[in-house]
Amino acid sequence: MRFQTPLQPAVLLRRYKRFLADIRLEDGREVTAHCANPGSMMGLAEPGTRIWVEPNDDPKKKLKYGWRLVEHGGGHFTGVDTSVPNRALKEALNACAVPQLAAYETVLPEQKYGQGSRIDFLLRQPGLPDAYVEVKSVTLSRRPGLAEFPDSVTARGRKHLEELALIAARGQRAVILFLVQRTDCSTVTLAADIDPAYAAAFDAARAAGVEVLCLGCRISPERITLAGSLDFI
């Protein structure tokens, strides 16, 4: 997935009200950017952090910049836009580029299921059980090389796990897919200390037959694309 507009480097001054960030552009201007991430962004929102933002000239948008990346040392990046995983995964699913799900030719995003919920992707193929795929963007890392989910308590995420467990019990495929938007991690685990209830629901979902997939990303200021599978601990 290529960014629609070339990204520009900036320095984060502060993030506040979840969706707003004051930044300093390279030319010295201080502006407010949109932060498309409702999570805690633990470890990613420290003042002085080097970030990358996407400008826009859309007259309907009040904010003319969107925060897209955090730059780390060693040429590593983290993608902070939570809409990116679904967009990147949709491209990959349509291209049959996810080996574990490549047998499905029909890809239906945002389908209603469960109790007032929407599954990120419903996959269908004659002769195969439907596959319900819930995608989670993973950006937290508190130990080198290890990505963790979630970065804050998520009652919504727990509900999704419970509904996936019911799907699996009916004989359909139910998949929780952790898409790691970091280039400095090779393994994935649960942040059980942050949300013990989510970890318990996760264990129950796996016991009910819910599959776990973890995928990495290649990230640069030009594009974000899916990489290979990551190990889940």
Image (cartoon, rainbow, N blue to C red):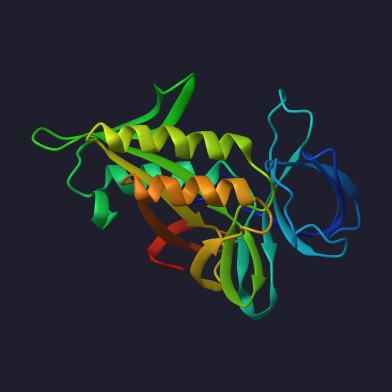
- The answer to which of 159 and 2 lies nearer the viewer is 159
On the picture, is 205 further left or further right than 195? left
In which image quadrant can residue 144 be found? bottom right
Q: Residue 24: x and y, percent? A: 87, 55
- The answer to which of 71 and 54 lies nearer the viewer is 71
Q: Is residue 1 visible?
A: no
On the picture, is 100 further left or further right than 151? left
- Residue drawn at the location 42% of the way across and 59% of the way down: 214
Q: Residue 83: x and y, percent? A: 56, 41
Q: Is residue 8 above or below residue 143?
A: above
On the picture, is 215 further left or further right than 193? left
Q: Residue 73: x and y, percent? A: 69, 78
Q: Is residue 157 visible?
A: yes
Q: Is residue 122 above or below residue 187?
A: above
- Residue drawn at the location 90% of the way across and 51% of the way down: 29
- The answer to which of 223 and 204 lies nearer the viewer is 204
Q: Is residue 53 above or below residue 43?
A: above
Q: Residue 64: x and y, percent? A: 76, 38
- Residue drawn at the location 65% of the way across and 52% of the way down: 80
In which image quadrant can residue 43 be found? bottom right
- Residue drawn at the location 57% of the way across and 46% of the way down: 198
